[in-house]
Amino acid sequence: MSRMLIFVFALLVLSVTAQNDEKFRIYDAKGERRSFEQVIEAMKLVDVVFVGESHDDAVAHKLQLELLKAAFDRIRSKQIVLAMEMFERDVQVIIDEYLQDLITEAHFLSSSRPWNNYKTDYRPLVEFAKENKLKVIASNAPRRYVNMVSRRGKSLLEMLSPEARRWIAPLPYKEASKAYAEKFSKIMGINEHQSANNLLEAQTLWDATMAFSISEVLKANSKALVIHINGAFHSENRLGAPEHLASYLPNVKFLVITIRRETKSLEFDKSKHLNLGDFVIITN
């Protein structure tokens, strides 16, 4: 067999292997196939990219890192900022100290309350940011305040000190939209005769605080492109955090990428995936 035939055969084998090992497919909101390149091109036109994930989806975490790397390498007109639901606003100073190499990673981890899957799933993002001198924003409300609202309602937030209020969205924060509230009730299994006001208010505090954190970045730097990593529910259908962001910055341009894990197929199912995001990435 000639060298040329061997080369062609090798390419065919690699092609088939790649197809068999396919881990994700990218679609637009309506289910048309799209490419990674098209996602990056769309990111160039906005101020914020919400990347919604399932927190235990390994493929999603790898894709997030590739999106961050591609944005850093190819979107030169913007200053890339990584923002994360996985860190709470009151640990921002600790993140900054670690990024500046003032404290060790051990002290960073012991003080910043990282999620249990930080080392496997989110550390690569933070380390890439550290290596390339990118800002990392802790966008979330402290869990203690979210828990407080879920137990006793948002009115209790008024009792917080001015210092404590720095770590949440300005009060009063906007109520959840009707569409978001209906979606929340459905996923929580709440019917029209039941009430989960405190739970919805706590969820909304979460969304509003993340959105406010992003707005602060954009107000301080008009050239920023914020890549925000969050659970998919917080941004699916352009609801939740994106809605609150638009209330803080009416002219903001944002893109929603929803990464949805499916166990059986990478095909776009309109009954489940329609309009989940501007781009919907199905992983397996």
Image (spheres, rainbow, N blue to C red):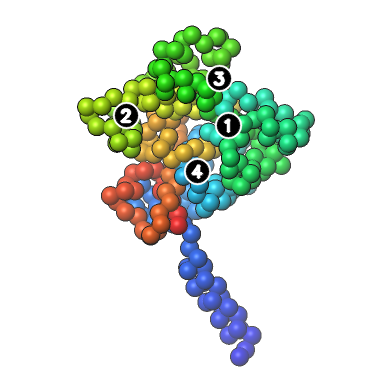
Task: Please provide percent x and percent y for residue 2.
Answer: 62, 89
Residue type (three-letter) at the residue carrying disc 1: Phe
Which structural element holds mark 2?
helix
| Image position, residue 65 (x, y; %) | 58, 47
- SS for dot 3: loop
Compared with residue 166, is residue 20 higher up or lower down, i.e. above or below?
A: below
Q: Residue furthest front?
A: 151
Q: CA distance from mark 1 to mark 4?
A: 14 Å
Q: Is residue 147 left or right of residue 94?
A: left
User: Mark 4 — residue?
Assistant: 55
Question: How far across and down, in percent of the image, does residue 41 sit?
Answer: 50, 47
Q: Which residue is mark 2?
A: 181
Quick one: label 4, few (<14), some, or many (20+) residues within 10 Å? some
Q: How many marks?
A: 4
Question: Between residues 235 and 262, which one lies in front from this camera angle?
Answer: 262
Residue 145 appears left or right of 111 = left
> Quadrant where the N terminus lies?
bottom right
Q: Which residue is mark 3?
A: 167
Please report whichever mark, 3 or 2, sits nearer to the chain's N-terminal start.
3
Front-lying residue, 157 or 239: 157
Q: Of the residues under marks 4 and 2, which one precedes in the sequence?
A: 4
Position of residue 60 measured from the top left corner of the image (x, y, whole percent): 51, 49
Residue at x 53% of width, y 14% of height:
165
Question: Crowding at label 3, few (<14), some or many (≥20) Cα neighbours within 10 Å?
Answer: many
> What residue would you read off at disc 1?
87
Task: Please identify the quarter of the rendering in which residue 33 is found.
Answer: bottom left
Snapshot quadrant of residue 234: top left
Along the line of sight, the residue nearer the viewer: 98 or 252: 98
Q: Earlier in the sequence, mark 2 or mark 1?
A: 1
Q: Quadrant of residue 200?
A: top left
